[in-house]
Image (cartoon, helix red, strand yellow):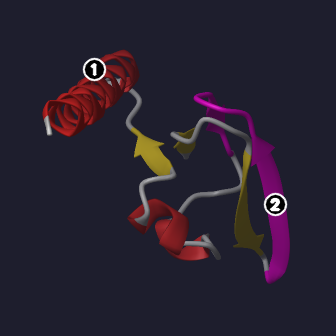
Amino acid sequence: MKVRNRRNGTNTISYKVGGIAKSEIITAGSVVNLTDLTDFNQIINKQDFNRGWFELVEENKSEEIVFNSALEKAKKEAESYSAEETKKVKIKNK
């Protein structure tokens, strides 16, 4: 399975293979092909997927997913920046 780290820093994914726990360190934004990982149920830290820190990457759509996640991240940053600027303007006007 291919797994992408969506965080800005490194993150560790833990999974079981044949009853033995393994872990892999994935750098920020990179995609790693874990050949030992064949089923989502092998993953120990599933909550990291729910938090959005990791995502499974399909073979054919990997480039499209990278573009879409980068676009979504840029939109969120722009919205948070504009919200902060609006707060600063309201405070100055008071």
Residue 64 vs residue 74, the one in the foreground:
74
Mark 2 belongs to which amino acid? Ser
Q: 10 and 20: which one is in front?
A: 10
Prevalent SS, magenta region: strand
Is 61 placed above or below 42 here?
above
Quarter holding residue 32 = top right
Identify which amino acid the numbered label 1 is placed on: Leu
Q: Residue at x 41, y 29 (%)?
A: 59
Residue 3 occupies which quadrant of the picture? top right
In front: label 2 or label 1: 1
Q: Is residue 33 above or below residue 13?
A: above
Q: Around disc 1, counting alpha carbons within 10 Å, would you say few (fewer than 14), some (14 to 19), or many (20 or more)? A: few
Residue 45: % across, % down: 62, 73
Q: Residue 15: percent from the left, percent from the top?
A: 70, 68
Q: Which residues are magenta?
A: 19-34
- Mark 2 and mark 1 lie on one chain; the one further toward the N terminus is 2
Front in this rendered view, residue 54 or 62: 54
Residue 1 at x, y percent in the picture: 55, 46
**To which residue does mark 1 refer?**
71
x 80%, y 51%: residue: 24
Q: CA distance from mark 2 to mark 1?
A: 29 Å
Please, what secondary structure does the residue beneath circle 1 have?
helix
What residue is rendered at 64% in x and 57% in y?
37
Residue at label 2?
A: 23
